[in-house]
Image: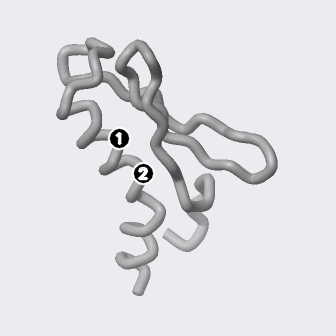
């Protein structure tokens, strides 16, 4: 697990006008990490898509806790 490479946190969530949620990292410029729709593949701003985006965005913090 020590050799795992990933985009460092924090990751943030942005809502798009078409209902998609974008998880990204910013360090001078913004790097998209995930484009999240609901479980049916629809980009409709659903609560499911928002919850999935929150879960993905918390990954760096969850990894840090696991390493403790």
Which quadrant would residue 62 be assigned to in this image? bottom left
Label 2: element kind:
helix
Q: Residue at x 19, y 23 (%)?
A: 39
Q: Are marks 2 and 1 in contact (CB under 8 Å)?
A: yes
Residue 58 in the image: state x and y as whole percent: 39, 58
> Quick one: quadrant of the C terminus?
bottom left
| Residue 19 picture location, percent across and down | 35, 19
Quick check: 66 left or right of 7? left
Q: Residue at x 48, y 36 (%)?
A: 14
Name the residue tied to disc 2: 57
Colouring used for the render: one colour
Q: Nearer the viewer, residue 18 or 41?
A: 18
Q: Nearer the viewer, residue 59 or 24?
A: 24
Residue 54 coordinates in the image, percent (x, y): 33, 48
Image height check: is 34 above or below 4? above
Q: How far is mark 2 from mark 1, CA to CA?
A: 6 Å
Which residue is at the far right? 28
Q: Is residue 29 above or below residue 43?
A: below
Q: Residue at x 45, y 75 (%)?
A: 64
């Amino acid at each position: 697990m020590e050799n795992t490479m990933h985009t460092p946190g924090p990751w943030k969530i942005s809502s798009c006008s078409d209902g998609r949620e974008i998880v990204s990292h910013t360090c001078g410029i913004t790097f998209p990490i995930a484009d999240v729709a609901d479980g049916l593949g629809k980009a409709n701003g659903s609560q499911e898509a928002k919850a999935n985006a929150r879960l993905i965005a918390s990954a760096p913090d969850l990894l840090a806790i696991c390493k403790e």
